[in-house]
Image: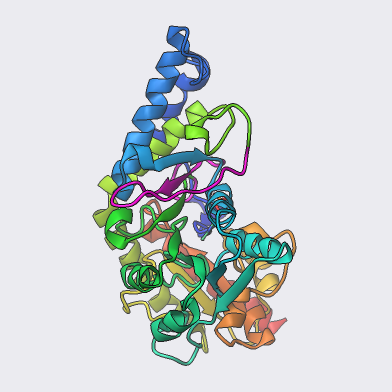
């Protein structure tokens, strides 16, 4: 690896498309470009069959059946369809979310609140607790109470990596007769997902977080044991059983199917690899950067994504550091890429009780199964050099 090759450590924002995934997609652009909705000729039926194989692969990767998978343009659209689609069936009910949800969840509930929906936002445990960023399940139980239609809790947080106990949350939510939506955007390829076992009624997925293409996603809508009903939010040709109209992105869906298949096949090896490298990276940083602190749950707590590292470097402004890191060849971020067009202090770190100054001193690294030891060593050297130069300046 040459000295100026960028080390990509922003895998919570997006991941590199696996070459195998890309290869699976190409024929669906070049040779088999039919519309999956065109049943009158072989080009259309071939595309439809490819979409159905992708649906099977996604369903297998998340513990669902094919009839429970609705394809969308990504996790943002899936989340919007799940939440707006569920609450529109019972608009007088309450909706409950965690304060640390992704903006895809927070912004749709804000919008629905402006239209009259009652929304409760559940706080998380603070920075000085055993596992910062966790939910107090007794408090959740109290808040969900009666009259709640829908609860939306993320499987794993995209900034500090907290993994929530979804089965226990599902028991609470169902004991009050509400539905549970789980935002699983950060989970595929990093954690074992079984939507049926975890008790989700609705679950959102994104292909580009697990080495698949951007702009493709899926929504799981439960049909086993009980049928969950939601209202469509996009109208037109009636694709996806009427729940999401619009011509299907055949190459993208083929890529998502292959990415999910590879992610679940390689899960054990990948999770171990990322945990080991993340531990090495943290140890190198602790040795090299005096005063560095971890944001979020301990690395060995068992409730943190294996690829997540979020650190606070006292005395260093995070955005100045990120610019310097970008110059010397490290891609990292301050928090959610999805909101980086409107830079605001991270609502997740604020929810943990970090001061404004501490939030500004924090940066997030995300590893992937493709990250190498050489990259981690190079990144820690570059980070150390950047911090030293900024501390001197
Ligand atoms: C937890 C979470 N939910 C939803 C999204 C949105 O996903 P997409 O980019 O597929 O719309 C993201 C993307 O960062 C995410 O991390």
Q: Is residue 144 left or right of residue 116?
A: left
**Quick check: is 226 in the magenta stretch?**
yes
The relative height of residue 97 versus residue 179 in the rendered view (above or below) is below
Residue under the image location 47 percent in, 33 percent down: 241
Looking at the rendered image, the quarter that the C terminus falls into is bottom right
The relative height of residue 385 versus residue 130 in the rendered view (above or below) is above
**Magenta stretch, overall SS:** loop
Q: Residue 368 appears at what percent x and percent y?
A: 41, 55
Q: How many marks?
A: 0
The answer to which of 242 and 364 lies nearer the viewer is 242
Where residue 18 sits, quadrant-wise, is top left
The relative height of residue 56 versus residue 149 in the rendered view (above or below) is above
Which segment did they paint magenta?
208-234
Residue 294 visible, this orientation? no
Q: How is the image coloured?
A: rainbow
Ligand 1, what quadrant? Answer: bottom right
Where residue 375 sits, quadrant-wise, is bottom left
Residue under the image location 41 percent in, 48 percent down: 220
Where residue 162 sits, quadrant-wise, is bottom left
Residue under the image location 46 percent in, 78 percent down: 145
Q: Is residue 353 left or right of residue 210?
A: right
The relative height of residue 356 versus residue 146 in the rendered view (above or below) is below
């Amino acid at each position: 690896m040459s000295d100026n090759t960028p080390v990509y450590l922003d895998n919570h924002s997006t991941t590199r498309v696996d070459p195998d995934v890309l290869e699976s997609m190409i024929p669906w652009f070049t040779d088999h470009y039919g519309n999956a909705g065109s049943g009158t000729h072989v080009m259309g039926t071939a595309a439809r069959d490819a979409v159905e194989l992708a649906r099977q692969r996604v369903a297998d990767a998340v513990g669902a059946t094919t009839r429970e998978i609705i394809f969308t343009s990504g996790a943002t659209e899936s989340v919007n369809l799940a939440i707006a689609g569920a609450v529109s069936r019972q608009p007088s009910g309450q909706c409950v979310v965690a304060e640390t949800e992704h903006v895809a969840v927070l912004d749709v509930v804000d919008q629905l609140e402006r239209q009259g929906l009652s929304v409760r936002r559940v706080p998380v445990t603070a920075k000085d607790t055993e596992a910062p960023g966790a939910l107090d399940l007794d408090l959740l139980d109290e808040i969900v109470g009666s009259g709640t239609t829908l609860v939306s809790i993320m499987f794993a947080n995209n900034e500090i990596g907290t993994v929530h106990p979804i089965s226990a949350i599902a028991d609470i939510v169902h004991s009050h007769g509400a539905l549970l939506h789980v935002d699983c955007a950060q989970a595929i390829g990093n954690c074992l997902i079984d939507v049926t076992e975890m008790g989700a009624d609705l679950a959102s997925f994104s292909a580009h977080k697990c080495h698949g293409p951007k702009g493709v996603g899926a929504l799981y809508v439960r049909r086993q044991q009980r049928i969950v009903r939601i209202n469509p939010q996009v109208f037109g040709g009636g694709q996806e059983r009427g729940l999401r109209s619009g011509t299907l992105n055949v190459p993208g869906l083929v890529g998502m199917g292959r990415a999910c298949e590879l992610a679940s096949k390689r899960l054990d090896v990948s999770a171990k690899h990322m945990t080991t490298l993340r531990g090495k990276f943290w140890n190198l940083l602790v040795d090299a950067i005096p005063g560095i602190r971890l944001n979020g749950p301990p690395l060995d707590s068992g409730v943190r994504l294996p690829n997540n590292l979020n650190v606070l470097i006292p005395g260093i402004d995070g955005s100045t550091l990120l610019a310097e890191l970008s110059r010397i060849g490290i891609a990292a971020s301050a928090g959610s890429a999805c909101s980086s067009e409107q830079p605001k202090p991270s609502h997740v770190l604020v929810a943990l009780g970090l001061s404004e100054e501490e939030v500004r001193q924090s940066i997030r690294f995300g590893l992937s199964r493709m990250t190498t030891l050489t990259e981690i060593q190079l990144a820690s050297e570059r980070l150390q050099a950047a911090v030293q130069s900024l501390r001197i300046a």
